[in-house]
Amino acid sequence: MCQIIFVFTGLVEAAAVINLGIQYDELSLDEKSEISFAEQGLITAVVLGIIYRMANSYQPLSEDFFKYDWGVPFDLQKGWLLWAGIGLAGALTAMAMTGAVMSFFSGETPEMEIDSLVTLLPSIGSLNITFSTACVVGTTGVLAPLLEETVFRGFIMASLTKWVPTPVAIIISAAVFALAHFTPEAFPQLFVLGTFMGISYAQTRNLLAPITIHAFWNTGVALLLSSLQLQGQ
């Protein structure tokens, strides 16, 4: 369902660009980054609106459904920032081990899935500290994590826990998360990342925990791409 919404929204946006006479190939890097931010903002608004509308039809919802709670960030049991740090450290360690195992058996370096950052690659590392820089950060570090974690953890995983044990819900939501990126070569590492984001959400029942992990992951990839691009110049 979510992928259908993404595709439909993308088609609407493409039609709007054509009707407005915008020549994407002729745009500057700043203009492309701003359009990417607007695109991600549109998709986020549309998908979250539909998800919330669907969930509201099943009222009353559990109190931890779609929970974004800024309180008690370092509480041992429910601290979203504490468990985001634990989850991120665990995910990076497990992903490194997964990559090493994949390299050992295949003899090739595993691909790193970079999601929507691919389209922003020309812009990353080429922008000044401007509004366009904020657009790149907003796209990869705010809007994308907010959308994906609300869908995969806040909606899919939370719904599954009503029918299956939480560990099973974590695994299923992580698999769906990895499959949704349409990068088979990166599936193992994305699955690991999704699993740790699911664990952080299961522990805190607060979407800020997986959103923070996701945001740091995307930002880290963006910095890596920026470094590689600068080295190639």
Image: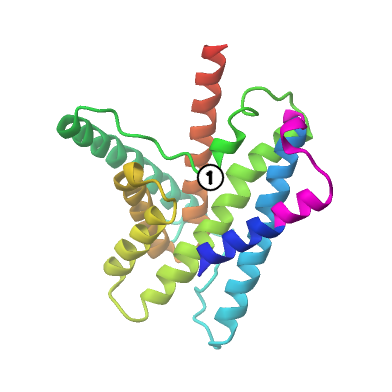
Q: Residue furthest right?
A: 20
Residue lying at 33% horizontally and 63% vertically, measured from the top left? 170
Q: Is residue 54 above or below residue 11?
A: below
Q: Is residue 25 above or below residue 139?
A: above
Dominant SS of magenta comes to helix
SS at mark 1?
Answer: helix
Tell me where the magenta segment starts and ends, as one range: 13-29
Query: Residue 24 location, x and y as percent?
Result: 73, 38
- Report the front residue among 107 and 230: 107
Q: Residues within 10 Å of mark 1 (few under 14, many from 20)?
A: many
- Report the front residue among 208 and 172: 172
Q: Is residue 14 above or below residue 90?
A: below
Specify whether 226 is left or right of 176: right
**Quadrant in the picture for residue 172:** bottom left
Residue lying at 53% horizontally and 45% vertically, measured from the top left? 215
- Report the front residue among 112 and 203: 112
**Label 1 belongs to which residue?**
215
Residue lying at 62% horizontally and 28% vertically, measured from the top left? 124
**Quadrant in the picture for residue 185:** top left
**Quadrant in the picture for residue 33:** top right
